[in-house]
Image (cartoon, grey):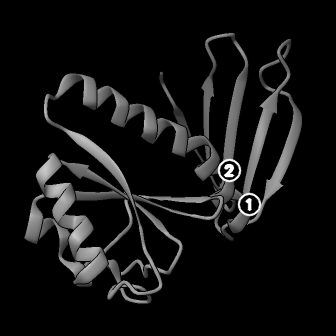
Amino acid sequence: MEIEQTALPGIGLRHEFTTRSGRRIGVVSHRTGRRDLVIYDPDDPDRACETVKLNDEEADALAELLGAPRVVQRLNDLHREVEGLVSVKLPISEGSPYAGRPMGDARVRTRTGASIVAVARGTQIFTGPAPDFVLVPGDLVVVVGSAESTSAVDDILARG
């Protein structure tokens, strides 16, 4: 799929693509941080028939809704392609030594070779969390690696 990028002087950037069914969709990223989701008229691809203005929080929520299922699909595809690769969801309990601390403090990849690829918090999914991402009780941490390495991550998150 080809995504076209157009600079909009004084405004920001517009990214557009055409769906397989022929519908044109765009996102205008304003310099202010606002995002506009644009649906173009099927009969006139230069005319917007609908524009939805999104603030940062709304844009993040939409990205998570659209992105989370793709992450799961990619993991499932990897499982089929790579023998021995597993993904597990590990809870962060109240008693975890990493509850309330940045994820990087656990040094999971360095200590086990496994990777934390996402964190589920309530209805939100944080994909590719950075080391400064703070874990809280109730989070579900998605870990990818071998059975042994993901088990070691479980021990680290539970006991340190």
Q: Which residue is mark 2?
A: 62
Is residue 114 visible to us here?
no
Answer few, some or many: residues within 10 Å of disc 2's Cα (few below 14, many 20 plus, some between 14 and 19): few
Residue 128 picture quarter: bottom left
> Alpha-carbon neighbours of circle 1 within 10 Å: few (<14), some, or many (≥20)?
few
| Residue, disc 1 | 58
Up the image or down, 160 lies above or below 56; here it is below
Quadrant of the snapshot with the C terminus = bottom left
Residue 61 x, y percent position in the rendering = 67, 57
User: Dot 2: what SS?
Assistant: helix
How many numbered callouts?
Answer: 2
Q: For numbered disc 1, what is the local secondary structure?
A: helix
Please state which of residues 32 and 70 is positioned toward the viewer in this rendering. Answer: 70
Who is closer to the viewer here, 74 or 8?
74
Q: Is residue 73 visible?
A: yes
Instruction: From the top left corner, tell me how far across and down residue 20 is, in percent.
Output: 61, 12
Pointer 2 and pointer 1: residues touching (CB < 8 Å)? yes
Residue type at mark 1 is Glu
